[in-house]
Image: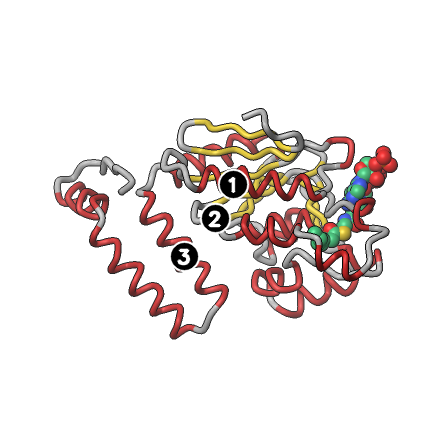
Amino acid sequence: MSEYETIIVEQQGRVGWITLNRPEALNALNGQVSEEVAAAASAFDTDDSVGAIVVTGSEKAFAAGADIKEMESKTGAEMLDTDHFGAWTRFAAVKTPVIAAVSGYALGGGCELAMMCDIILAADTATFGQPEINLGVVPGMGGTQRLIRAVGYYKAAELILSGRLIKADEAERIGLVSRVVPAADLLPEATSLAETIASKSLPSLYAAKATLDAAMETTLEAGLDVEKRQFAALFDTADQKEGMAAFREKRPPHFQHR
Ligand code: CO8
């Protein structure tokens, strides 16, 4: 898949990998990166042979933020006109579960990209933060909204207003990160988790993600309604019949992802 210049895209088994690859800029997210990440994720998302996506960076940086040098001279109108937001909206909307495997810096847009994923696994070397306030701006890729939903108003407010960076252990303690592992184990752990997820029935993964998304975005009553409909719809899939038959027959299920 050599059409990409700023990312490396690979498929291993049922897992799609997107590796940010701008080492000279600590994987800063410029317009090209955002378009490529969104395109790669959308391509995996429409491919039934992919059941989980992992987004990762380098040992030193998951991503050190949006590209400050690209943004610096823009006007407000130009920023609004720039379609980077559209690419990230497309990325955040993929139906397939996405794991962020974070090593090193996940700052600003890097932290926001991790939060667009469903699960954040962190190396013990990871550093998270929303330092935009130091640049005279605020988070602009969802950080103000998703960080609050992840860690609560008061912790998010402290981090966003002060720009303080936090290490992986604090990120885990406040609920931003699901698990911290030794740096050397990050990719094996991400592989193992992604393979576990990708082995499940694809329609049930899509349904689980849609209901989780609903919980982030709507009221309890509306979210419960989404859950009820998603739950019921799965009873028209071959995999639900297979999953429940396998339970009854005391054998592992053989999902066909339909
Ligand atoms: N943008 C552009 N270039 C960057 C960025 C960045 N965010 N981060 C690092 N780089 C570049 C550096 O300029 C440097 O390049 P050069 O060698 O040409 O000078 C190279 O990467 C290596 O960086 P450093 O020499 O600074 O490496 P250090 O190890 O000394 O420091 C840090 C690492 C602490 C991560 C430091 O690079 C840093 O503070 N980076 C900026 C962090 C930051 O402020 N991030 C927030 C950016 S704003 C943002 O993300 C807004 C999101 C919303 C955007 C919505 C529009 C789409």
In this view, the residue in front, 133 or 165, is 133
Label disc, if present, on residue 217 of the rendered structure: none
Residue lying furthest top in this view?
2
- Quarter of the image where ligand 1 sits: top right
**Location of residue 176 (image quadrant):** bottom right
Callout 2 touching callout 1 (CB < 8 Å): yes
In this view, the residue in front, 72 or 155, is 72
The residue tagged 1 is 41
Disc 3 secondary structure class = helix
Crowd band around label 1 with a 10 angstrom C-alpha radius: few (<14), some (14–19), many (20+)? many
Q: Residue at x 63, y 69 (%)?
A: 153
The residue tagged 2 is 94
Q: Residue at x 66, y 56 (%)?
A: 141
- Vertical order, 174 against 238 (above or below): below
- The answer to whether any part of residue 129 appears in the image is no
Amino acid under disc 2: Val
Among numbered discs 2 and 3, the one appearing first in the sequence: 2
Crowd band around label 2 with a 10 angstrom C-alpha radius: few (<14), some (14–19), many (20+)? many
Disc 1 secondary structure class = helix
Disc 2 secondary structure class = loop
Amino acid under disc 3: Ala
Query: What is the CA distance from the residue labelled 2 to the residue labelled 1?
Result: 7 Å
- The answer to whether any part of residue 233 appears in the image is yes
Crowd band around label 3 with a 10 angstrom C-alpha radius: few (<14), some (14–19), many (20+)? many
Q: Is residue 130 left or right of residue 245?
A: right
The residue tagged 3 is 210
Q: At which x and y percent is residue 203?
A: 32, 47
